[in-house]
Amino acid sequence: MNKNEKTFFPLFEFAVNRAGVGIHAIDRNGRTVIYNDKMKAIEGLELEEVGDRSILELFNFDQEESTLLKVLQSGQEQLNVKQTYWNRKGTEITTINDTYPVFHEGELIGAVEIARDITALEKFVLHPLRKNSEPATFSQIIATSDEMKTVISTARKAAVTNLPVLLVGESGTGKDLIAESIHNESTNSNGPYYTFFGHQSDATIIDRLDEDLNMSKPFTLFCERIDLLSISLQQKLFSFLKDSERHGRQFIASIGDDPVELIAKGTLLKELYYFFASFTIRITPLRKRKMDILPFVNSYLARRKERYGTSLEGITTEVEQVFLQYDWPGNMRELEFLLDEVSSLATMESVITYDMLPLHFRLKSDSLTETSTQATDFIVQPEKELMPSTGI
């Protein structure tokens, strides 16, 4: 390292580690060369754990699913890509990534990924469509579009029949709120409500679930992302559900993609799908029902003003246009995270202006405007954790 490099390296290191986004760079062999503090927080690892291991040693996903490795192999940048994966400790991570190839003198020498965490607060049971902190009901869900009105209408019928329900939709679309609303408007609404998370590899978890729910009183069990369980665990879950069927027990499940495609890929047990398919409710991603964006924003600001006495009451026309142009790969959850970030920094402002939006979001929206990119569906990747809960 020459004198200039020694002078600038501390500045470079300081800037990278103070960045508000995760930065992960790999060389052409897939070895980590930059891993900043924000990325450590997102992925729950330390630089010492990353060391010179390849990405495939550190995280659980197929090689073709890693955006870093995709860019390293293709030499083409990938922007605004949502990715869900797990670290070596079994912790789930979901990010929205911008990933770039790095060339030196015409030769590809590595790739750099800039990641924004959209699940860091999920463990605190966020409810992105909820108007208040009370138990979710259909009347509390923001639904202006015909698509969401149809979802709620079908879900209300499901609540009356008490038959198994399958919710199909991307992360952040509000599947958890639909499930809870079905419970709260069903005949067994006085019973407990449990959520069984799909990110789990423990073969005994179904047995423990059986013990925990071995009760005679009515209850609702929401099996979130059953397509993320291994086939063997799906088979055990199916057996448990069949044995547990009785009056007063409501079973609801969710998946992140088309069930026919999941079955064809071997990631969803056909028998388990048929068990839940009495009512199949598909929740459209936000980019295909942008009519719901502004009503949600208005509801969010009104709710926050009532709860915290904040001065924000609306958004400018410029911000409105940006919100309507953006694709929202994280759906309503991403929109709420953004509003949380803006609102937490607001002081006496009465409206959200373009300059108040986070820099990473402004750069993204500017990029979309300049390139006139076409919104495309992204593939929802696994979320796998499996435990009884009363949360999302």
Image (cartoon, rainbow, N blue to C red):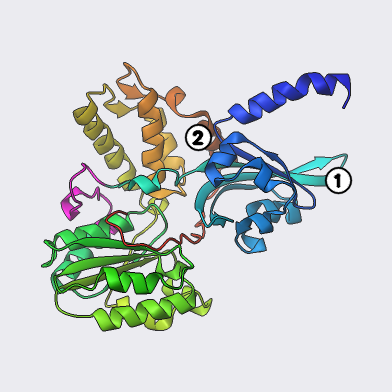
- Residue 131 pos. (x, y %): 22, 42
- The residue at the point 51 percent across, 36 percent down is 365
Label 2 packing within 10 angstroms: few (<14), some (14-19), many (20+):
some
- Residue 169 pos. (x, y %): 39, 61
Which residue was labeled with disc 2? 361
Kind of residue sitting beneath label 1:
Glu
Reply yes or no: does residue 133 show up in magenta: yes
- Residue 273 pos. (x, y %): 37, 78
- The residue at the point 46 percent across, 70 percent down is 229
Near-viewer residue (47 or 253): 47
Residue 364's disc number: none
Residue 274 in the figure: left or right of residue 191? right
Near-viewer residue (199 or 327): 199
Q: Main secondary structure of the magenta part?
A: loop
Q: Secondary structure at mark 2?
A: helix
Q: Which span of residues is magenta-colored?
A: 130-149
